[in-house]
Amino acid sequence: LRLCARGVKPNGHCYDNVIGALEASRSDWALAERVYRQASDAGVYGHWAGGDELDLHHSTLAVARVATRHACTVLAARPDDGGCNRGGLTIITGIGHHTPGGTQNAVIPQEIRAFLSADLAYPPVQANAVREEADADADADAARPGLEYSEVEGNAGRVYVSIDAIRAWAMRV
């Protein structure tokens, strides 16, 4: 963000809004991921420390999607050392205890599962001017096999994605 060059220190709300706007406009998802990485490096986000857990508690949906894709991209690029990089990723979505209105209003758990099922493809914009493009994108997304994940037994607020599934996804994109 150019704000940093001017001595302004963006906070989490600023980053949330920038990432949300980039994702919603479909203007540049790679830029949304770079902004996410910048915020993480600055200590604004602590979703993922490069290990085997990604904690999406207290995230906006846009940030949760960008964080999920970022973690999978980084993990896919790591060399297979035959040992410690074989564990995959546990994504902690929570079940909605911190959501206004409770678990029945929780967005992150269902939307992250849908995002994984859509092969980490960002959702199409639904504005009238781009409806045909969105329909074409949706058709293309429907043809994708999805990023295979499993529910973590005994914890409805977690899903697990194996490193093999992450690498197979990376080969498709």
Image (tube, helix red, strand yellow):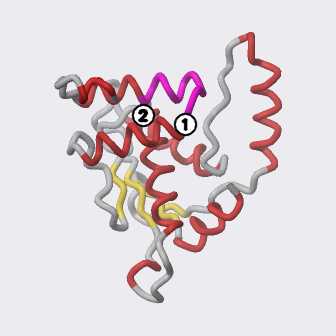
**Secondary structure category for the residue under label 1:** helix
Taking the magenta stretch, the answer to whether it contains residue 51 is no
Name the residue rendered at 63%, 58% in the picture: 147
Name the residue rendered at 42%, 30% in the picture: 19
In front: mark 2 or mark 1?
1
**Secondary structure category for the residue under label 2:** loop
Name the residue rendered at 61%, 38% in the picture: 122
Judging by the rendered image, the residue that carries numbered circle 2 is 106
Q: Work out which quarter of the rendered image holds the N terminus and state it.
A: top left
Judging by the rendered image, the residue that carries numbered circle 1 is 29
Amino acid found under the numbered disc labelled 1: Trp
Residue 60 vs residue 22, the one in the foreground: 22
Q: Which mark is residue 102?
A: none
Choose top left, top right, bottom left or bottom right for residue 104.
top left
Choose top left, top right, bottom left or bottom right for residue 133.
top right
Amino acid found under the numbered disc labelled 2: Ala
- x, y percentage for residue 85? 43, 78
